Amino acid sequence: MINLRAYLACIFIVFAWSGWITISRYGVHTALQPADITLIRYATAMICVSPLIVRHRWARFKLHQYLIMGLGIGFPYTMMTFYGLRVLKAAHAGVLVNGMLPVLGAVAAWFILRQRVSIVRYVAIGLIFLANFIMAGGDTFSTDHSVGILLLLSAAVCYTTHMIGVRLWRFEWRDVLVAVPVVNTLIFLPLWFVFPTALFEAELHEILIQAGYQGIIVNIVALMFSTYAISRLGTITVSIFMSFVPVGTAILAWLLLGETLNSWELCGIIGCSIGLFIYAWGQTWENRKRTLH
């Protein structure tokens, strides 16, 4: 039952993060600047969890642990993603950020957490990685997009750092729920005055859309679910699910933003589905092998 809940949490995360990239792509093409959306995200979350802040046991973790875990999913991650989305389509952003997570997660889990998986599951990770880059298509990796690609790949590294920190130091969802908005609001608020801003020129409904989705759905609900899933399933399994975000993003971008689905993206969707099936089959086979021994 515990694993079933964790897998359901992963499915929710896929939908939430797919919507996040799509909403962010919409947001950066309104009057709102990337710094505005980032501030709205963490300030909204901090206001919502403020009753929990004073009761939180802050001495449970060290300062550097809070900073690494919080900033990994914090403003460096969001700012790099938002600026990357100004250059690349939402579907391509999903590929470069979330499609890289299985590979980065597997490497980090191997060296830092000493977490191993079978050859079959490594094959599945490789297939998902390849399928994600097929989704991107050849025109994504042009020199015109080089800055956007670098920003989005850096965002993927940040998110991997967050997942490893949660697993390594055993953060629970309550810890993450409180620490992430506090760390990022306190550090980013002074920086917001340095970045370009149009917060006071933006339409109210644009601000409310970003506050509702970025601050509540993503930075509270989805963050709580992802922490729960990482603590139960590990970084590699969660990153495998996160690699399906490009699929959801491509479909949502097609439905909501009018970004067309081409043959490369359709092939990538099929490849990701096959890769996830192989990974799940490999995990089932490993569990049965352990039971027999």
Image (cartoon, rainbow, N blue to C red):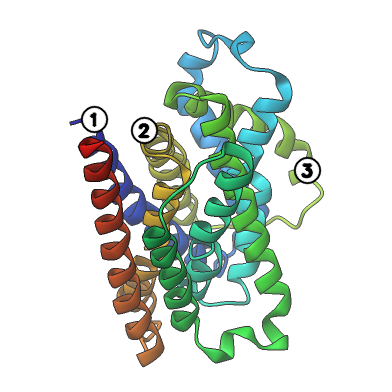
Mark 2 lies on a secondary structure that is helix
Front position in the image: 7 or 289: 289
Q: Residues within 10 Å of mark 3 (few under 14, many from 20)?
A: few
- Taking the spot 63% from the left edge, 45% from the top edge, the residue there is 111
As drawn, the label of residue 2 is 1
> Badge 1: few (under 14), some or many (20 or more) residues near its Cα, within 10 Å?
few
Q: Which residue is mark 3?
A: 191
Q: On screen, 281 above or below 84?
A: above
In front here: 109 or 49? Answer: 109
Question: In the rendered view, would you say 42 is above or below 182?
Answer: below
Q: Which residue is most to the right? A: 194
Q: Which residue is at a point 67% across and 73% down the rendered structure image? A: 148
Q: Residue at x 38, y 59 (%)?
A: 121
Q: Mark 2 — residue? A: 232
Helix, strand or loop for disc 3: helix
Q: Quadrant of the N terminus?
A: top left
Please give left or right for residue 184 compared with residue 205 in the image: right
Q: Does the CB distance between marks 1 and 2 fall below 8 Å?
A: yes
Quarter of the C terminus within the rendering: top left
